[in-house]
Amino acid sequence: MAVAEKVARRRAAGDDMVVVVSAMSGETDRLLKLAASVHSDAPARELDVLLATGEQATIALLSIALARLGVAARSYTGSQVHIRTDNAHGKARILEIDSKRVRDDLKHGRVVVVAGFQGADHDGNITTLGRGGSDTTAVAMAAALHADECQIYTDVDGVYTTDPRIVPKARRLDRITDEEMLEMASLGAKVLQLRSVEFAGKYKVPLRVLSSFEDGPGTLITYEENDMEAPLISGIAFNRDEAKLTIRGVPDRPGIAAQILGEIGQANINVDMIVQNVGADGTTDFTFTVHRGDFKTAEEMLRRVAQALNAREVIGDDKIAKISIVGVGMRSHAGIAGTMFKTLAGEGINIQMISTSEIKISVVVDEKYLELGVRALHDAFRLDEPPATHPHARKAERASR
Amino acid sequence: MAVAEKVARRRAAGDDMVVVVSAMSGETDRLLKLAASVHSDAPARELDVLLATGEQATIALLSIALARLGVAARSYTGSQVHIRTDNAHGKARILEIDSKRVRDDLKHGRVVVVAGFQGADHDGNITTLGRGGSDTTAVAMAAALHADECQIYTDVDGVYTTDPRIVPKARRLDRITDEEMLEMASLGAKVLQLRSVEFAGKYKVPLRVLSSFEDGPGTLITYEENDMEAPLISGIAFNRDEAKLTIRGVPDRPGIAAQILGEIGQANINVDMIVQNVGADGTTDFTFTVHRGDFKTAEEMLRRVAQALNAREVIGDDKIAKISIVGVGMRSHAGIAGTMFKTLAGEGINIQMISTSEIKISVVVDEKYLELGVRALHDAFRLDEPPATHPHARKAERASR
């Protein structure tokens, strides 16, 4: 096992280590299928007992592999190291970890191998944390132990300035703040489960994303608000899985937004960007985006609402793309939005919607301009150049504020 | 799952039930192979963590199957119901069970499904009980709960007077005492793991052997010393996996048996029957049986010993069979050995060795007479007739002692 060798190398280098593992590839799906073959509506409690065997097998096999390499190791299930959760089977939340036992093993020079994704509730019932749960276990364990770093091994070697499949010059970031990471991830650059990043942020656990397959420094997720080395813009996220709906000429009065979006929310359709413009004749235009899979349903609902409100028209478009620039630097730097809009204009790309938050600016454009827009912005913000090439300029700028 | 339906039927009939399960067929071997593929000398502690997943998957799946049948059920691993064992990984012994949680579930009308074969040591490390461990778990659980009966489902429908493949008239016993069962089992009629029978005897747990595949009353294992209904002879056990070794003309002096068998014992070769006859000329003949697989090794050792002792000769024979009649009735009845020897003589079968215990008589004969001997004895002791056909005779006999 490649993991065992990695762990053995790090142990030989003197690191104290707690390794949190997931089930082997495909195992969780195999177990779910097995359960489904018995009962289509299996009790959540029993499903958790079944799924927990996946990680339990992995901790044993990794410890056995470590023994073969001469590394003293001990495996523990979630219950054994007292990862106490609530009792929401299948999506439990970690409440506390008693790390006494783990500390004791570390003191004795042993590598501790912990089953991710699982814990036990107050009554000792086995629970699972749901998708991405192993990352959360690792973060929680790192927090409980005040570890120097929590390293998450994934199938990518770090967080990039944008998708290298679209921008070959895209650069791996050495560091990114947790806020940027959350914005990047939620915008489509999926590397880590958001929940584990949020969890890490809560306890300020230094989190590093690394490749399981190659050696490399990966990307460190930091929490320093005033990180001098933080670049102006960290990356460019995008997605093309949204669709846009506009209702035009609705009366401009209080409660109109709630009325328009109420029914859609009740149908469990998530709305992402929302833009409202005041029109000239006492009416307003209202535009929002939904997931493309919900486009048809949402459009029909909106047409009914439009009729009830006596609105002018409903326009739908599912050939759109969203491009966002993300960076904590924009908090202190004006002109970033201007650079973004000018760059897109320079390529002849029309902006259909704009939405901003403290650390990101998102625009909606015609889907066909997605690649062109991302590449142009990557160049404009010089994301292919490491920020370390001009750190003094940044520091000076900051200091002179 | 057939088990789930059986449990559901019994639950509907009003029985409170704790179901102890093994891993699914082939699963334990699959896991052992998986471990061996990682490391030929896997640490016992980690092997137990791995193997324990086998039963954990079964308890979850059975509980899910029960839910499908509308039966409220809860699954527990060994650790969860506090099956505390020593820390001899892979062959742990149960020290105590805290049945509070199980009682509580039973009180709420739930079927409790417990993983057999596993427990946890004082420090919470997962242990396994070794082969036959699930039977032992069931017995221990029955003892802790003072259950009315502990039912062991196997691939046979009970204990027979002898092997029906040899004696078609062989009859399923309704009852057998634990001592008889131990003698029958150790002599080759393997139905239950001896360890679970011994364990059941210690706590006087009524144990019933039943078929997993057919309905039927099975065989009840009892502990009544003076069971009026116990037949004179319960059954005939046999095996042909032993070989016989004789050393002739050794000096008849103290310590000679130890000298002869010492080296063989040190080589971890088990000796079964031992017979010593005093010869006429101050020497003695010494005969014993070993497992056939150990025959060649034992024979070579014995030749070396013979040389050292200046013995006359060593004779080996691996074409032998052992036939034993077993019954607590022989404690109080003379003449049983006579009937056995006369029956065999009547068929022209020469007896090579005789060995007796309180409740069994074993003889070694030429292998070719095995079937003939077993059939003749089965007839002679009228084992095809249920003892209930003449219970008064037995009762009267006993009472008149």
Image (cartoon, coloured by chain):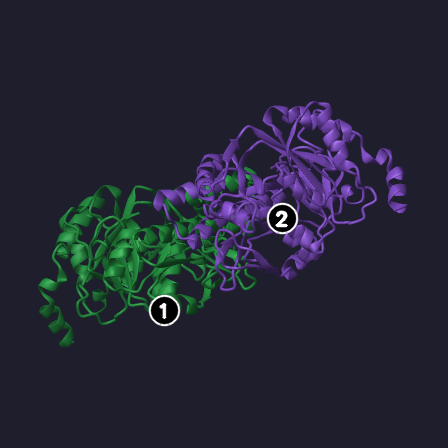
Chain colours: A green, B purple
Query: In this view of the protein, can residue B110 be seen by the observer?
Result: no
Q: Position of residue A221 (x, y in %)?
A: 27, 62
A59 with respect to A353 (left or right)? right
Foreground mark, 1 or 2, reads: 2
| Classed neighbour count for the residue bearing mark 1: other residues with Cα under 10 Å, few (<14), some (14–19), many (≥20) | some
Label 1 vs label 2: CA separation? 44 Å
Note whether B312 is above or below B90 in the view shown: above
Q: Position of residue A328 (x, y in %)?
A: 24, 65
Q: Quadrant of the N terminus of chain B?
A: top right
| Classed neighbour count for the residue bearing mark 2: other residues with Cα under 10 Å, few (<14), some (14–19), many (≥20) | many
Residue type pointed to by label 2: Ser
- Residue located farthest toward the front when viewing the structure as drawn: B281
Residue type pointed to by label 1: Leu
B235 with respect to B117 (left or right)? right
Q: Mark 1 points at which residue?
A: A145
Residue at mark 2: chain? B
Q: Position of residue A81 (x, y in %)?
A: 45, 63
Residue A182 falls in image quadrant: bottom left
Q: Nearer the viewer, residue B142 or B131?
A: B131
B253 with respect to B359 (left or right)? left
Residue at mark 1: chain? A
Give the structural element (helix, strand or loop) at label 2.
Answer: helix
Q: Which of B207 and A385 is in front in this view?
A: B207
Give the structural element (helix, strand or loop) at label 1.
Answer: helix
- Residue located farthest toward the bottom when viewing the structure as drawn: A400
Q: Position of residue A311 (x, y in %)?
A: 42, 49
Q: Name the residue under label 2.
A: B196
Residue B296 falls in image quadrant: top left
